[in-house]
């Protein structure tokens, strides 16, 4: 089973700043990595798949990078609507697994 | 945009079976791999298992002995049965679809509480 670890449980940033979130896999998942945004009371929303491809409708300020075991989600200039919890997820091997989440807060 | 809708009882007694369904509109049930994912209150996401319309299934080993996932093509529904539940199974349960590039469609989720 692949364990996904997000390095920060909480990241405090200000609107307009850049945010960098990290995710590490316990073994290589190649590029089979997604990032999700979840707001209170809502289902997660896919932001990034294939480690770096933005999903439909996702603003360009969101970007993903990495491969193998190390991944990064960058939000270039935080907007108020970006404050949420972010999860990484590997879909390289079953069982699929998620990181524990990073809460982006002001 | 495909809309998914989970349904089922919001309260289940300990040791009983939690049963949920997810309706997939528009005949798209054969287009995706369908998963059940859960999220205990205030916690992270846990993948339970998935199914393809052909019947191929995968499960999380931590739950495999208690889980059944099925698909009914005629009703455009997938189902989840989780047996012998305890309070630790209380969570929001989501159905979600993917085609090898992450879960790009989700239901709204349904909260299930296990309590006597």
Image (spheres, rainbow, N blue to C red):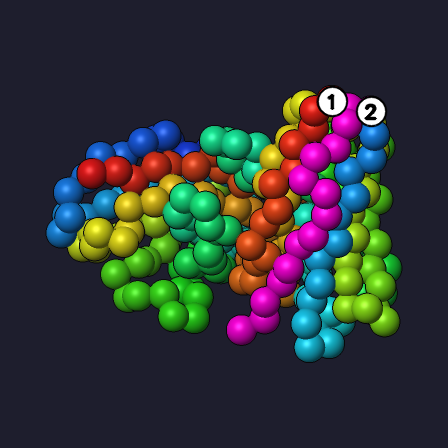
- What x and y, as percent, mark residue A18? 19, 48
- What x and y, as percent, mark residue A97? 59, 41
Per the model, the C-alpha gap separating discs 1 and 2 is 10 Å
Say whether residue B109 is left or right of residue B89.
left
Q: Nearer the viewer, mark 1 or mark 2?
A: 1
Indicate the quadrant containing the C terminus of chain A: top left, top right, bottom left or bottom right: top left
Which disc number belongs to residue B94? none
Q: Which residue is mark 2?
A: B15
- What x and y, as percent, mark residue B66? 83, 33
Instruction: Tell which of B113 and A29 is nearer to you.
Output: B113
- What x and y, as percent, mark residue A53? 42, 64
Say whether residue B34 is left or right of residue A72.
right
- Whether residue B53 is in magenta: the answer is no
Lower sequence index among marks 1 and 2: 2
Instruction: Tell which of B86 and B43 is nearer to you.
Output: B86
Q: Share a chain, discs 1 and 2?
A: yes
Instruction: Tell which of A14 and B111 is nearer to you.
Output: B111
Q: Chain of mark 2?
A: B
Look at the numbered disc 1 and give the secondary structure of its residue.
loop
| Residue plotted at (73% across, 69% down) | B29
Q: Chain of mark 1?
A: B
Look at the numbered disc 2 and give the secondary structure of its residue.
loop
Q: Would residue B61 be seen by someone viewing this image from the given angle?
A: no
| Residue plotted at (25% across, 61% down) | A61
* Mark 2 neighbour density, 10 Å: few (under 14) some (14–19) many (20 or more): some
Residue B15 higher or lower than B70, as above or below: above
Residue A77, located in which quarter of the rendered image?
Answer: bottom left
Find the magenta span and give its range.
B1-15
Q: Which residue is mark 1?
A: B116
Indicate the quadrant containing the N terminus of chain A: top left, top right, bottom left or bottom right: top right
């Amino acid at each position: 089973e692949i364990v996904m670890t997000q390095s920060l449980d909480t990241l405090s940033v200000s609107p307009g700043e850049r945010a960098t979130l990290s995710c590490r896999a316990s073994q290589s998942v190649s590029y089979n990595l997604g990032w999700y945004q979840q707001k209170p009371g809502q289902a997660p929303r896919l932001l990034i798949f294939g480690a770096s491809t933005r999903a439909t409708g996702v603003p360009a300020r969101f970007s993903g990078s990495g491969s193998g075991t190390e991944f990064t989600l960058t939000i270039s200039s935080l907007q108020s609507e970006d404050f949420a919890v972010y999860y990484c997820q590997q879909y390289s091997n079953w069982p699929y697994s998620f990181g524990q989440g990073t809460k982006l807060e002001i | 945009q495909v809309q998914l809708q989970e349904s089922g009882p919001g309260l289940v007694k300990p040791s009983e079976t939690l049963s949920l369904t997810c309706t997939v509109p528009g005949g798209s049930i054969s287009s995706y791999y369908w998963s059940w994912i859960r999220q205990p209150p205030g916690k992270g996401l846990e993948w339970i298992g998935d199914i393809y319309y052909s019947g191929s299934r995968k499960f999380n080993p931590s739950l495999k002995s208690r889980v059944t996932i099925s698909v009914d093509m005629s009703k455009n529904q997938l189902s989840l049965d989780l047996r012998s539940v305890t309070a630790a199974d209380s969570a929001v349960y989501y159905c979600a679809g993917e085609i090898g590039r992450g879960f790009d469609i989700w239901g709204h989720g349904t909260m299930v509480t296990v309590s006597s």
